[in-house]
Image (cartoon, helix red, strand yellow):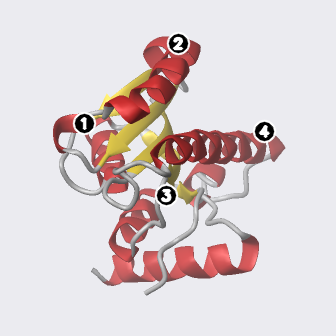
Amino acid sequence: MGLSLFGAYGARKGIQTNGLWINAKFLSSNGGIAGSSATSAVSRAVELSRDYSGQLKDSIVGTSLEGRITMAVGIATDANGNQFTLIGTSEPNGYIRPQISGVVSRWGYRLGTNLRVVKGGSHAEADIVAYCKAQGWNIISIGATRPVCNSCAAEMATAGATVATPLKNP
């Protein structure tokens, strides 16, 4: 619990200071600071999470779903270095509403089999973290359509994920 609270505090402080919380686990897996290729990989993952979650948010704004559901986009890698884009939703069992399905379809076409909708029923961000843990994947970045709550920020920080979108104010 203490680690989670420290992680959430660190994530919030990092975002306030630098604009984002850096995935230190990804940058420094051997205890040292990784080279610029790792830094650019994290930057690309953050950009992808932010861009895709922004498009999902745009598809929700002005509809009856606004303020009712949260969508999240996570970027993860498996043990072989294959990158996956994961979509989480606060809807039960990974249900994708018709208002959002067009954005998901366009990205699915673009990414092919590397796009996965994560089933869950919890917070979208937490579902992505849980899925990555179950797969043994390294979660690099997560962005969401709504500000990330403290609980999800703590889980993301503990997993080493970079928060790509704003945190919710306490």
Please tell me whether residue 20 is drawn above or below residue 60 in the rendered image. Answer: below
Q: Crowdedness of circle 2 by 10 Å Cα count: few (<14), some, many (20+)?
A: few
User: Residue tagged by mark 3?
Assistant: 160
Q: Crowdedness of circle 4 by 10 Å Cα count: few (<14), some, many (20+)?
A: few
Kind of residue at badge 4? Ser
Q: Earlier in the sequence, mark 3 or mark 2?
A: 2
What is the distance, in whole Å, between disc 3 and disc 2 at their CAs?
Answer: 29 Å
Residue 104 visible to an observer of this rendering:
yes
User: Residue tagged by mark 1?
Assistant: 94
User: Residue tagged by mark 4?
Assistant: 37
User: Residue tagged by mark 2?
Assistant: 109
Residue 119 % position (x, y): 23, 37
Q: Residue at x 30, y 33 (%)?
A: 96
Pick the front one: 103 or 108: 103
Q: Secondary structure at mark 1?
A: helix
Please tell me whether residue 91 is drawn above or below residue 164 in the rendered image. Answer: above
Foreground mark, 3 or 2? 2
Residue 10 % position (x, y): 54, 79
Kind of residue at badge 1? Gly
Which quarter of the rendered picture does the C terminus lie within? bottom left
In the displayed image of the protein, which residue is found farthest to the right?
A: 36
Q: Earlier in the sequence, mark 4 or mark 1?
A: 4
Q: Secondary structure at mark 3?
A: loop
Pick the front one: 45 or 106: 106
